[in-house]
């Protein structure tokens, strides 16, 4: 059986402002650091074989804090959040006015339309699923900690449960918390969501 711990990074200033900021590289707030430190206490009692992380600062900082066993953290940019392109750092209200045409296309076909100079959810889905195929093959029957972003973790959860892309909205991952899914012979069970 493969155990997969999904960890969302701690809070950032952009989270507090309610902005889209997928590939914008920013650090944790003080609260985000505290969230990660509190989560570290849970990981003192969790045995894991490998920890992997998105390459963005907020995820790497969280991974470094919770990495109780001081294992090497494998960094991969395929675990990044969606690239929002020119929408980065803006609220949906601002985007709806400044990029009205692209915004309306995105609302109508969120899976395939792209934010201005960004990427589509279907492209993001492909890169994350490609990564998951590799990591699950390399660490079959091991315990894997994945530190990433809400959008990325939604896709990973849907991938593990063999759900279509439109089902990602059934999941929400809280800052500085972990969820546990277990995969046995291709069958996935949710063991816990947003634990701390």
Image (cartoon, helix red, strand yellow):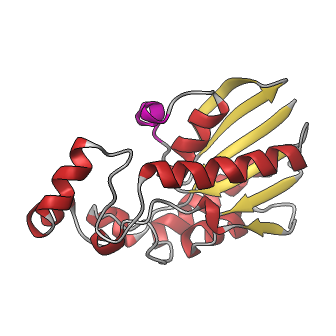
Closer to us: 91 or 104: 104
Task: Please name the residue shown 79% across and 51% down the image.
Answer: 134
Task: Please name the residue shown 21% across and 51% down the image.
Answer: 105
Q: Is residue 5 magenta?
A: no
Closer to us: 111 or 167: 111
Quarter occupied by the C terminus: top right
Q: Is residue 70 left or right of residue 161?
A: right
Residue 189 in the image: x percent, y percent?
A: 70, 23
Position of residue 189 relative to residue 165, above or below, is above
Which quarter of the picture shows residue 9?
bottom right
Residue 126 in the image: x percent, y percent?
A: 58, 50
Q: Main secondary structure of the magenta part?
A: helix
Residue 196 is at least partly visible in this image:
no
Residue 96 in the image: x percent, y percent?
A: 13, 59
Which quarter of the picture shows residue 119?
bottom left
**What is the span of residues highlighted in magenta in the rendered image?**
165-172
Q: Is residue 25 left or right of residue 14?
A: right
């Amino acid at each position: 059986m493969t155990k997969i711990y999904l960890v969302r990074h701690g809070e950032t200033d952009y989270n507090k402002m309610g902005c889209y900021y997928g590939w914008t590289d920013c650090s944790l707030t003080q609260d985000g650091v505290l969230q990660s430190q509190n989560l570290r206490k849970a990981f003192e009692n969790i045995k894991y074989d490998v920890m992997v992380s998105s390459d963005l600062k907020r995820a790497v900082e969280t991974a470094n804090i919770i990495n109780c066993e001081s294992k090497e953290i494998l960094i991969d940019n395929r675990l990044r959040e969606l690239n929002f392109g020119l929408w980065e750092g803006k609220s949906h209200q601002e985007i709806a006015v400044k990029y009205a045409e692209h915004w309306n296309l995105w609302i109508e076909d969120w899976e395939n339309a792209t934010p201005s100079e960004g990427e589509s959810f279907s492209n993001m889905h492909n890169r994350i699923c490609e990564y998951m195929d590799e990591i699950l093959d390399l660490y079959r029957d091991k315990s894997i900690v994945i530190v990433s972003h809400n959008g990325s973790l939604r896709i990973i959860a849907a991938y593990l449960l063999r759900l279509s892309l439109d089902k990602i909205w059934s999941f929400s991952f809280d800052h500085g918390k972990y969820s546990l899914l277990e995969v046995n012979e291709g069958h996935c069970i949710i063991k816990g969501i947003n634990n701390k």
